[in-house]
Structure formats: C-alpha cells, structure tokens
Image (spheres, rainbow, N blue to C red):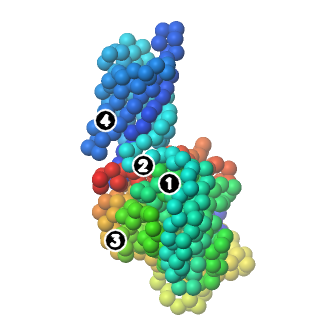
Amino acid sequence: MKKTISLVIMLLCFGFAADAMWLSARWEGTVQVGKEQQTLKFNINEARDGSIDAYISAINGKGTNIPCEASRLPGYYQIEIKIPSMNACFTGTVIDSDCIEGTFLQNGKEQPLKLLCTDYDSGEVVMHIRPQKPKPLLLIDTLGNKKTIEQEWKGDFAFREVKFGHDDVTLAGTLYYPCGNCPVAILVSGSGTQDRNGEMFGTKPYESIASYLLSRGVGVLCYDDRGAGESSPLKGNETTFDFAKDAQSAFDFLMNYEGINHSRIGYCAHSEGGQIAFINAANDPRVAFVISLAGPAVKGRDVMVKQNLSMLDMVGMPYTQAQVEEIEGIFDDIVNIADTTALQESLRKRFAASTLQRYTPELIEQSVELMTSPWYMTFVRFDPKPYLEKINCQVLALNGEWDFQVDAEQTFNALKANVKNVMCELLPEHNHMFQQCASKLESLNYATQGEISGTTRARILDFVKGVYTKKQ
C-alpha cells in the first residue's frame, strides 16, 4: 500500500509450518590441507523422511566416492557432515539455497568452509531446460478465448504473455513455466497500483522472486494490477474484495491452462496481497499453498493502530496513553460510524484537536478523503479471522523484524491461533519490503535498501518444494 497520509510522521499504509531447506544438490568448497588447497565436491541427497545421504564425489577434480555421515542438527538450518575416512567433520548453517557456511574440522584443526551449490536437484524437477521448439498448446482463458499459440522462449525458460479476467476487467501478465510437473506461484501485490514486476523504490521485487524460482524449477504467474501496464484501468471504488476477484481469475486461468499441473497452484502474496490470498484460499479448496509476505492476519483496525504506534517507536518518539487513545479513536470511528458524512465530520474534529501533529486545513481534507474511501474503510473494517479458520492448505508466513507496517508478533499470534497448517518465521533485520537492512532506522527508507533479500527468496523456494515432497 503506497497511499499515504501524515499522522505525526506515520504512514497509514502498507507497501507490500515450512519444511527445512531442501539440501539435495551438488555442493563445492575449498579447504587447506597442509600446504595444499583442496576443492571438495559433495553430493547430498535428502529423502522425504528427513534422512540424508552424502558422499564426496571429487577432490581437486579427481573423481572419488568417499562416504559421509550427514544429518541435521537442532536448530532451523544446521547440518553436520562427518567424513570418517578423512578424520574430518563439517558443521554448517544453510544461508540460502545456494550457500552453506560453517567450520571444517580435520585432525583437530578448524578452518572456515563455505559450500556453494553447483547443481540444484530436488528430485522433482530439472533445474535447467535446454531451449527447443515446443509443441503448440491450446490456450483456454477465463475470457472465453480459445486459440492455439506457440511457446516463446527466454533463455532456458518458457514464457508467455497472457491475458485473463472476469466481468469487465482484463488483466495482463507473464506466465513463466519451466516444465510440466512443477508448482506454480501466483504473485499478488500489496496495496497500491503495481506492475507485474512490482516495481517501486527503484527495485523490482516480483521480478526478482520470479527469476529465482524459475531457475530452481518453480513456475510463476505475474500480472499488472488494475491501472498498471496492460491491465484495465481503475474505476476508483475498488476494495480488497475486488482485488481478490482479480487474483481468483489468475488462479482460474491457470486451472484452465493446458500443460500445467492443476493440483500444484498457490499464491505468493505481499502485504494486502496476503489478505487476498487468505480470502481466496478459504473460498477455494483447490488452492495448494499460500505464502504470505507480511500479510495482515488481524482486524484492519488493529493493524493500523499497531502500525502507528510501531512507527513512533521506530523513530524514538515518546507518546502518552492519551495519544494512544487518540489514535485508537480515529480507527474506532471508521469501524463504528456507518454513515460516511458523519464519519468525515468526526474525523475532521479529531484531526483538528490532535496532540500528535498540527494539521493544516488542507492536510485534514486530504486525510479525511483517503480514510473515507471505499478501499480504506473496507480494509480497516475487515476481519480475516473467519477466512483464516477455513484455510486447509499449507501456509508459510514470513515477516521482517523491522517491519513497522505489519507487526510480526501480532500477525503470527493470529495465524497460529486460526490456521490449521501454518509455519511462521521472523526474518532478522528485514523491513516490510523484505530488504535486509543495516539498521532499524535505515529500514524505513525503502529506496536505499536494495532488492528483496536472498534469504526471503530461499525460504519461499524451500516451502514450495517442501509442500510437494511431503505429498509425494
């Protein structure tokens, strides 16, 4: 959500249980043995029951078959690889799907060792697909169009520019699909108008997620929001439920798309998009998974109160209990006053009497206009609990430690209380845009914190892979 008003210096807005890291891959790292450096190549295969087979396939490029004893250690992403014949042991932490960092102990001597993934193979899909001319496929979209189209190729991966929609709304997007038996994630944006890449603050987080998942065997559908790119224009009275229909039409489009595994389609959704995914997963049992990136899980009123207080805490601004009640009163009015004209008048009086900030007449009117729009009132009044209770698919919820817009503790408590199959993970030093930041204060400046973090992308991948390794 990028629509903002000023209440103090706060933003009244948002922007935008998992399996362990899937380790099956070939890994490579270099250690010092005496005066010589040795490059070790490990083959690791993790079975569905959690057992791990590992061996050293090469040392300095020379083929070997040295057996290892590998296992996970207590802790979220810890692995131990013992090599009895070398009197050695590697203990490492999985940083992301491409890197394990730790310590190599041999004959009592410790040294750092970083293992890098050289060939990712989950046992389900092939990571790289060689370019070739594929067969034409029949496209049947939700607009009722039927036609045979040729597959286009971009590098090693197939992609198609697609259109779908519902009623009088047409949405345009890109479908990236690496092979015929892969899961597909529909990327759903947070509030505000965003294109299919999620471009904002000089970054393209959805493009970053899509390229990462594609290179590891997961399909992705990205689409332009209403009012962006090639999609229909905004009408101005849309609410979260209208945008949920848009996301549902993306899901229905994939369900009618030949060549896709229709049992493996789910949502990867940011901020308000997380609410949209919750709504659609509750209403449609065909949804295979939900990945919520800071998706609010409590009443909108409670989200906004906490957001404003968190912002004050983030910038070190002290506040009184009376000021807490002042903030609560604004959002209680939105919930409790049904008549829009009466609500507008009440908000004008509250802003004029505010002890948190001096409101000019112009700022009062801007704030009142935003906070009495159909979208804003719907969001503040929305209670996701009835939807969360109906979700049966697996859910991964990721939240940043330094996210002042959607509080992690508030969100996780609600999800754990109401969702049957949920895994919640707090990402240290991450903000609402899932950028890893140098400091809490810097985390507020989305424009300077770079792209979505590798840790975030890796957790998304591991979850999608894990959902299906469990089912098979």
Residue occupying image coordinates x 44% and y 57%? 180
Distance between the Cα atoms at labels 4 and 1?
27 Å
Q: Amino acid at mark 3?
A: Pro
Which one is nearer the viewer's eye here, 89 or 313?
A: 89
Report helix, strand or loop for mark 1. Answer: loop
Q: Is residue 282 above or below residue 265?
A: below
Distance between the Cα atoms at labels 3 and 1?
25 Å
Q: Which residue is mark 3?
A: 285
Along the polypeptide, which appears first: circle 4 or circle 1? 4
Residue occupying image coordinates x 63% and y 78%? 232
Report helix, strand or loop for mark 2. Answer: loop
Distance between the Cα atoms at labels 1 and 2?
9 Å
- Marker disc for residue 97: none
- Marker disc for residue 125: 2
Q: Which residue is mark 1?
A: 178
Q: Is residue 373 above or below residue 4?
A: below
Report helix, strand or loop for mark 4. Answer: strand
Picture coordinates of residue 132, whole percent (x, y): 56, 52
Along the polypeptide, which appears first: circle 3 or circle 2? 2
Q: Is residue 455 visible?
A: yes
Q: Is residue 306 above or below residue 470?
A: below
Q: Amino acid at mark 2?
A: Val
Q: Amino acid at mark 4?
A: Ile
Q: Nearer the viewer, mark 3 or mark 2?
A: 2
